[in-house]
Amino acid sequence: MRFEGKGTDRTYAYYLVDHLRWLESEGLSVEKVQFRDLERYMGAVGAEVPMPFGSPWRVGKAPYGNSALVGAASCLKGFYLHQAALGCNRELGRHLDLRRLPTKADRNRAFLGHVSRSLAANPLAPPRTRRRHPKMLPEGARERLLRVVNAIRDRLVVDWLGDGGFRVGELCGLHLSDLHLRANAACGECRGPHVHVCHRDGLANRSRAKTKYAWVLEDGVVRGGLIKRVSPAMIHTYFDYMTGEYPRDVDHGMLMIQLHGPQRGMPLAPEGARKMLGRAGNRARLGKIRPHMFRHSFATAVLDASNGNLVVARDAGGWASIEVVDEIYAHVDLHDPVFEAALHSVWGEA
């Protein structure tokens, strides 16, 4: 199936089609499905091993993680509440139409705590979990990767992911017009070298920036979007890439391109960057290297360098709120001298 919608519409379409296929396989219909059937479906799409109900749904594909399960739960609730509003399966709609009291985070987001009404709840959603210790790059991984990559473009991927904290979809979605790599650029939005991460739909390589800040192209100058600073190493690698490997006949204007094969010169897809890093990690004997490891390492390094300033880390990495940075990255280094001194004091070894 190919859905031509935008953003989360496409994601919800995939969730819904998968659920409708499951209904058909179970001999159920939208009119007859019950709440316990939806609970069974949520368990099936998240199952990693066979359970009493049989094999997991989506055999041969990775089970949904926590974030995907939350998205699927939102999709199902919205779909069945809409059906109930049309007069179909109202009993299921009553099961799903629940309310809850606002949490402290809800009050903070609503400016000064002025939240008195109840909020929608989703009984299908799993408990919210965040990994407190994200998987980061092994020690010295960046230098070892730079020694084994085969192209300047691949060096650019390593340098830009490492120094910019980009998501791989953001990097592969960059256009040359987004790059303002000289001081005091014409956009007037940042004095130093920087890039504008702009959310675009329908790109040839199917990459997409997660952030959706407003941006415009005025007189050939990009303004707005998510602005990220650029390091000298990133600039040097960029100029090496543009003068050494970037074809002169490319007309799509995107930064990351394929270098070999029949698709030479076409935009590089995020999956291509992932596979390149995986192969380089194996050659460097680092194990499986994933692009998001660079982002985790970047966030942790910024926090360490800024003495734990969450606002600095949020803006450097492009997170929507400091809560995400606080929950995932703001924890003490287990080998920090202050941390070790406190433990030795408690242990009576000071």
Image (spheres, rainbow, N blue to C red):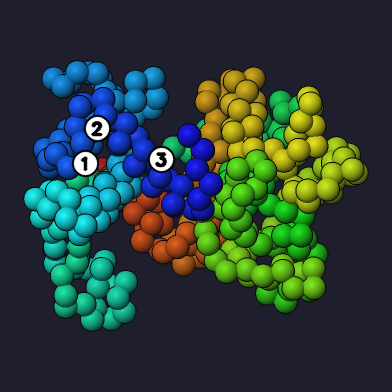
- Mark 1 and mark 2: span between their CA atoms? 8 Å
Q: Residue at x 21, y 57 (%)?
A: 86
Residue 79 percent across, percent down from the top left: 27, 50
- Mark 2 and mark 3: span between their CA atoms? 14 Å
- Is residue 334 rendered to the left or right of residue 45? right
Q: Secondary structure at mark 1?
A: loop
Residue 275, image quadrant? top right
Q: Secondary structure at mark 3?
A: helix
Three-letter amino acid code at the position of disc 2: Leu
Residue 224, image quadrant? bottom right
- Is residue 347 rendered to the left or right of residue 232? left
Residue 137 seen by the camera = no
Residue 2 seen by the camera = yes
Quick check: marks 1 and 2 in contact, CB under 8 Å? Answer: yes
Q: Residue at x 32, y 31 (%)?
A: 21
Q: Which residue is mark 3?
A: 14
Q: Count residues near mark 1 (Cα–Cα under 10 Å), then give few for <14, some for 14-19, many for 20+.
A: some
Front residue of 328/186: it is 186
Three-letter amino acid code at the position of disc 1: Val
Disc number for residue 23: 2
Q: Residue at x 20, y 59 (%)?
A: 85
Residue 109 percent across, percent down from the top left: 32, 72
Q: Which residue is mark 1?
A: 30
- Mark 3 and mark 1: span between their CA atoms? 17 Å
Q: Secondary structure at mark 2?
A: helix
Question: Looking at the picture, does residue 124 appear above or below residue 139?
Answer: below
